[in-house]
Amino acid sequence: MSNKDISRLDKLSLSLEPTNEQMHNLISQSADLVINYLSNILEQKASNIPTNIDSELSAIRQPISENAMELEEILTLIKDQILKYSVNTAGGTYQAYIPGGGIFAAAVAEFIAAATNRYVGVWGIAPAGVEAEMVVIRWLCKIVNYPNKAKGIFTSGGSMANFSAIVTARRALLPENFLSGMIYTSDQVHQSIQKAALMAGFPPQNVRIIASDKEFRLNPDNLLTAIQQDKESGLTPFLIVGNVGTTNTGAVDPIDKLVEIAHKNNIWLHIDGAYGGFFILTERGKELFSAIEHADSITLDPHKGLFLPYGTGCLLVRDGEFLKRAHQVTASYLQDLDLAEEIINFNDYSPELTRSFRGLRLWLPLKLYGEASFREYLDEKLDLASYICDELRQIPNIEIVAEAQLSVVAFRYLPKSGDINQINRELLSKINATQKTFISSTVINGQVILRVAILCFRTHLEAVQATIQAIKIAISQIET
Amino acid sequence: MSNKDISRLDKLSLSLEPTNEQMHNLISQSADLVINYLSNILEQKASNIPTNIDSELSAIRQPISENAMELEEILTLIKDQILKYSVNTAGGTYQAYIPGGGIFAAAVAEFIAAATNRYVGVWGIAPAGVEAEMVVIRWLCKIVNYPNKAKGIFTSGGSMANFSAIVTARRALLPENFLSGMIYTSDQVHQSIQKAALMAGFPPQNVRIIASDKEFRLNPDNLLTAIQQDKESGLTPFLIVGNVGTTNTGAVDPIDKLVEIAHKNNIWLHIDGAYGGFFILTERGKELFSAIEHADSITLDPHKGLFLPYGTGCLLVRDGEFLKRAHQVTASYLQDLDLAEEIINFNDYSPELTRSFRGLRLWLPLKLYGEASFREYLDEKLDLASYICDELRQIPNIEIVAEAQLSVVAFRYLPKSGDINQINRELLSKINATQKTFISSTVINGQVILRVAILCFRTHLEAVQATIQAIKIAISQIET
């Protein structure tokens, strides 16, 4: 390399490395935008997707170009396009699907983690960062009453946690040719299980869908029958997936019975607690799913029940060795990183090699607010769902399809005449058209069912009363 | 629910919902910490993991408790434990494995995304947010010269992108019982391919490792022979994984030849460009891997070559329909979300259902700095690697094992006597013990090789000169 070439190396514009002042400006303008937005989030529309939305999006559709754009212009696009045109999933009015969180302290933790970019896949690279993640994993193991040998990983969400659980069970119990392996779950299962099974190599017919009972819980008798039939056909039952809170109705499967069946038949029991798992922090939850400690693995979604921003899932495995055996692969360029056996390299327990420092966004809020704050909010969500049931019961022609086992309530409107499904679809449109609430629907046994799901930390009594009010208004519109 | 119970609902402490003032305080104290830290990052030790590290970590190991902790105390733990005790992966001194990034603007974008918690899995929930992600995906497709029908997803990193690529190829080309399917890749392949294959259901022996040539590139003749032999044995070659920049030495496989072989044999060609893919933004990269546009899928890691924080990967698929067919599963509770066909629901293209708004952390910096800034930095990295080669060549007894094809240089020290591998291991220890640089080693054909990898955006001429200096000092220590 000639001297001329070397001198070129000194002439970099350093555009990607702002000065301290520029950094302060960047974060403070962004923080103003965010805090202004959050400060009146209760007044925001629950959803704002106009019918001519397509014509409104031309500014955001501008391609990436060779040249820089002004920060002000960028922040305006975020405010007036990205935040404006959307369902307000961060607001207390969001009571659809399974609401997420987004507590401010977690967003701050995420900022710190991203700007200081530590690599926590391997203990030897960031021991203190890994220890912070371990503190959270240990706490999660503690709240589900798992033994010391339990281990866990943070994932991008429930889907990937369920995926790693399926792979772990597959590798623990099945041979390399695993196509006789059968998975059992209720007809209320979350699609992530079917998707994860497919990714992990199981064709759809290897997932046996078991009819649930009247309260939408997996029926253990049906399960046992299916397992026995499959065994007789030469198939290999190896995995039961139970739900601690289904997405449709919040139903909690009879875990104690699933534990019994799994143990007797040498089947892995995975509990999908992505939605409901964190209710174990409350007395009511503890009572409902006390047997969860006997499950072989558990999915928890901190971006649901711990009110964190989207992108924070977790898988716990009762005997951590199985998690490691399923995921460990070695590589020559990682040779410098061999460490004492008791030390955790998350890489060895996860499908991911490089990932973000996810643990910080749990560790910081848990430290800052303490477990008690989260328990209080979760208790409130259970109370709110029970309040909704009471209120719906007083509305004429409303059928409660699923009482709140946790914080989801499913119902439908029974019209005097007409196509019930069609009318309930219209009702949903009218409820959400009030822009005071946003709820969703599902189909159970061919029936269109509306559902209110309470889990956003910003959903308090007022937001729930607004939903009841919107339902009443929509019904009156339908009835006139 | 009695009136007494309802009144309880009004008594929530709202501890998770700070006031505007508290939010400003939280982010500004955190920003001060981060900016102070970054402002002297060049003076930080390249690695700081004392031999008694275990005894230093008691503060960070304190468990989560019922009660809240002071913010100041938490930030002190981040500063004096998490950031202090680690390899400084955010610094320009980090030249090991494949360095990551962490540009400040991306961390700010991440903060905005997390605090406003938009759900971008489905267009109908956050159309403008999804459009911002689409803008980035379209730009990525443009830089690799993909046609309009191409589609892509953001992943948590290269491992998950490679995983989705393998599943996509599997589902495009193999029957449900896919165990005769064979995957081909060079002996320089990244472990994420082997791990991803395992996750996707392929036993280790289904990944055929092809010997590379003297420059560590996949040898097309060896590949062709292996494919033909496997076909004759009744196996089903279905996937070739080529590298655009191996982790070991930065080798670029002969993509044009791989394209030819793949096309002739009806095999899916996946290019793992996690490390090197973004060099296509430079003239040199464009020349080296112009044939990449004919690959069926490409992994890119914006948290490497676009200098973003860890947690940002990407998979592009030339014909997006295959990506969708591999990942789409439907669920009844998503029924409200059916949309026009041209609209993208990322859910349908990805193993994930709920994930963070990853696109914002690409979109914001790309808008703020423009493509040109990134190109300039990437060009600099190529220059720096070439500078390192020149400098190493002038050090006696250094053998350059792999010249810089991109921005990795591999070398070893040839001692006059003694165990070469052992001495090179010692040399590495001594180089890193200077705390002025942090590089890593690998093993190729039984030989311990040291490697310098230049990709951190903060690595400029000075940091590279420090590495050369550290190597010289370490050699002089070995030689005395």
Image (tube, coloured by chain):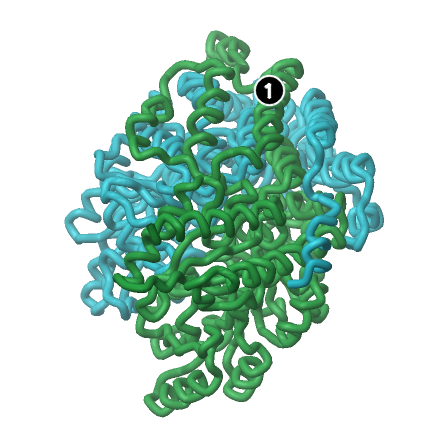
Chain colours: A cyan, B green
Q: Position of residue A392 (x, y in %)?
A: 55, 26
In which quadrant of the rendered view does residue A436 lie? top right
In which quadrant of the rendered view does residue B175 lie? bottom left
Report in which chain the residue with disc 1 lies: B
- Using the rendered image of the protein, determine whether residue A113 is visible from the camera's viewpoint: yes
Q: Name the kind of residue labelled 1 in the image.
A: Gln
* Residue extending farthest front: B480
- Using the rendered image of the protein, determine whether residue A420 is visible from the camera's viewpoint: no
Q: Considering only vertical position in the picture, is A143 above or below A252?
A: above
**B334 left or right of B213 in image:** right
**x 44%, y 66%: residue:** B399
Dot 1 alpha-carbon crowd within 10 angstroms: few under 14, some 14 to 19, many 20 or more: some
In which quadrant of the rendered view does residue B320 lie? bottom right
- Residue holding disc 1: B29
**x 65%, y 13%: residue:** B21
Q: Considering only vertical position in the picture, is A158 above or below B210?
A: above
* Residue extending farthest left: A264
Q: Quadrant of the N terminus of chain A?
A: bottom right
Find numbered disc 1 in the image and state the secondary structure of the residue it sits on: helix
Q: Quadrant of the C terminus of chain A?
A: top right
